[in-house]
Amino acid sequence: MAKYRLDYIWLDGYTPVQNLRTKCMLRDFDEFPTLDQLPEWGFDGSSTQQAEGGDSDCVLKPVALYPDGTREDGILVMCEVMLPDGSAHSSNGRATIPDDEGTWFGFEQEYFLMQEGVPLGFPKGGYPNPQGEYYCGVGFANVGGISREITDTHLDLCLYAGINHEGINAEVAKGQWEFQVFAKGSKKAADDIWVARFLLLRLCEEFEVDVEWHCKPITGDWNGSGMHANFSTDHLREVGGKEYFLKLMDAFEEFTEEHIAVYGPDNDKRLTGLHETQSIDKFSWGVADRGASVRVPHGFVKDDAYRGYLEDRRPNSQGDPYKIAGRILQTINSVEI
């Protein structure tokens, strides 16, 4: 029998952006445990904006397990926050979204690595060369000294955890990076993104570097950070068709406000109509158009099949993937097949 370290992870009650929280317990198991072997665990919700001090008990309910590559016999335990009566806490977005394993999501998570309040590589008191030369860049002048060590280590940790991490690249601004995660089902995809974020934040503690998820941390002529959501369904992959696609885009346009409401705070600073974005108050789609709300890949329209996946480019880097994936699935479900 081995003693396993269980790091429970949850989202707190802060708004408009929830923070990741964690605490650790030790338990004895004969082998790597299953989800139903892990106990629920109470915590003080008054310290996380999830309860009042006079009635502060909240409960962590394990919903997903990940091996932890940084701890011997370590396990990361993604949790939902529940009330003592077993109902979902109001901050528990995961419990309220629709789910469908036939709906596949690929999230492109962008972020900045920051030190002493500025992106890594920014000259003190000034700015580097204009953005562009840093995209997929190589060399100290373009990516700095520790950024690649951080991003490569993060990739390894995600793979060890069983997260379907699909790649990394330096982005268009100095100090800006991206990683991609693919999963089947809205809850699984969002669980994986949140745990990948957790792993990056914890890793950066060792380097005394902060992760900035805000969609526009640097004002001026700089791209913001997004979390583009690539998605497909059984019907989009196997049947498709132009008629269905046009109905789907009509639905996305109809529910523009509902999508923007959960696509991350301060998105008006990023979705300006500049820097390869559509204005926040408009909806558009286009083939290979990075300035559209929804980008349609060339392969999707090949031979007039209108079959495959689509990319919603509006979600920002600070958005909650539970709410983003759930809203996309709601809109898809509103369209009659």
Image (cartoon, helix red, strand yellow):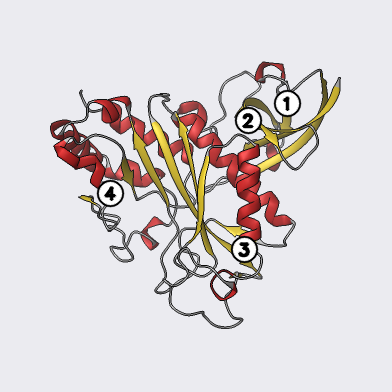
What number is the disc on residue 120?
Answer: none
Tell me the amino acid under the disc marked 3.
Ser
Q: Earlier in the sequence, mark 1 or mark 4?
A: 1
Please name the residue shown 45% across and 71% down the image: 219
Quadrant of the snapshot with the C terminus: top left
For marks 2 and 4, give the one nearer the viewer: 4
Q: Earlier in the sequence, mark 2 or mark 4?
A: 2
What number is the disc on residue 41?
Answer: 1
Q: CA distance from mark 4 to mark 3?
A: 29 Å
**Closer to the camera, 90 or 201?**
201
**Closer to the camera, 305 or 94?**
305
Tell me the amino acid under the disc marked 2.
Cys
Q: Report which quarter residue 259 is drawn in.
A: top left
Q: CA distance from mark 2 to mark 1?
A: 10 Å
Contact? badges 1 and 3 (CB < 8 Å) = no
Q: Image height check: is 222 above or below 334?
A: below
Q: Residues within 10 Å of mark 1 (few under 14, many from 20)?
A: some
Tell me the amino acid under the disc marked 4.
Arg
Residue 21 visible here: yes
In the image, 223: left or right of 332?
right
Q: Find disc 3 in the rendering and name its residue.
A: 147
Q: Image height check: is 131 above or below 110?
A: below
Please name the residue shown 53% across and 47% down the image: 15
Tell me residue 176's x, y (percent): 51, 63
Tell me residue 6's x, y (percent): 75, 31
Q: Find disc 2 in the rendering and name its residue.
A: 79
| Numbered disc 3: secondary structure | helix
Q: CA distance from mark 1 to mark 3?
A: 36 Å
Tell me residue 302's x, y (percent): 19, 41
